[in-house]
Amino acid sequence: MTCGGGGGAGGALRIAVIGHLRHPVAMPFMGGMEAHCHQLVRALVARGHDVTLFASGDSDPALPLHAIAERHYDAVLPWVEWHGTARLAAFQDAAFGLAWAAIADGGFDVVHNNAMHPALHAWAKRDGQPMVTSLHVPPFDGLADAVHDHAAPWLRQTTTSRAHMAGWWATPSATASVVHNGIDTMRWAFRPRGNGRAAWAGRITPNKGTAVALDAARLAGIALDVAGPIDCADYFRDEVAPRLDDMRVYHGHLGGAALVDMIGAASVLLSTPTWDEPFGLIAAEAMACGVPVAALDRGAMREVVGDCGALGTDAASLARAIGAARTLPRPACRARVERLFSIDAMIAGYERAYAVAMAGARASSTASTVALLA
């Protein structure tokens, strides 16, 4: 049974972070998973930990990167065409297998798993490798089975919200804890005034509800700036493009300072998940800038937005929520993020989970030794 390289709670650890392979961990981020992973690695390094990121080779070279595939898989086997196929499964098996081989030889204290590959759970249980898995999605069948079927004292899970946790476990789980996503409040800086426009950002795909945001903005009579990668070309062509006009404008896939400027300058952010959103990173990022949020009441949106926004259930009620949200004080939005969604709080939550996983591995190893000597 592997117990890691000797780091302890409260001290520097040798940490392997495994990234999701569909997209690179690099700006402009395709979505919240990539943004979270990038920030996680940087924050762990800043905390003094020895970190290695196992991800695609086209991820940010400024990160401590160990490439396990030359390119992210959407560049060579697009998910929309290849999901569920043996070829894509083989690609991921090979890449994550390379990661696990390096981890087995690397003397890591703990693995932080940000990927969704089921085999990682089986390998960690088999090898006694302490691992904390950050769950970023609802309990999809393959991943849910892997989590529930490979329970062990050295395997822990975190969810991004209480609502997200309830989707995974009907009753509180002894193996899981809530760790909210942390916001870089230096990058997402406070803006005292808005420009009178609304903003929407994310992957343009049905479960992000871009068309709902456009309808709500039209009903509210407010201009809307839309940014994000087109993840579903049919949806963009059939549902999004026909709703664009002089007041509601698509700006492409923005990243870095351009995205921060667009969001921070807005008077209100529209967040329109049509699925049970586990967290809603862009909503918290907007609030860090002082931008109140009008959101569809799905998943964790009520928990994240709190009293710094207004909620709706469809385009018509969201249009009314836009008017209500715009009256809210911007300093209160910033204060909510600083209080609940700081990077320090996120990393502290993960460090607690690391400590529990490592302690579970040590206890299991000791028990196995005692059993052998008995």
Image: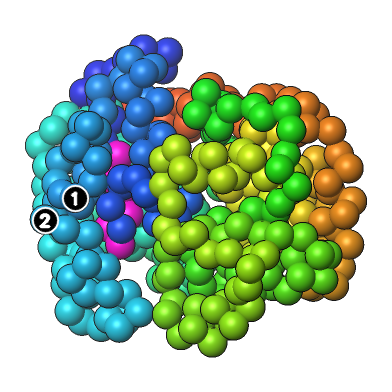
313 displayed left or right of 275: right
Q: Amino acid at mark 1?
A: Asp
Indicate the secondary structure of the residue bearing disc 2. loop
Looking at the picture, how far across and down is residue 350, in whole percent? 47, 31
Q: Residues within 10 Å of mark 1 (few under 14, many from 20)?
A: some
Q: Can I make out residue 242 in this image?
A: yes
Q: Is residue 285 magenta?
A: no
Q: Which mark is residue 39?
A: none
Q: Residue at x 42, y 58 (%)?
A: 253
Q: Amino acid at mark 2?
A: Glu
Q: Earlier in the sequence, mark 1 or mark 2?
A: 1
Vertical placement of residue 100 versus 349, above or below: below
Nearer to the camera, 99 or 125: 99
100 displayed left or right of 137: left
Q: Residue at x 42, y 13 (%)?
A: 10
121 displayed left or right of 229: left
**Stretch in magenta:** 17-22
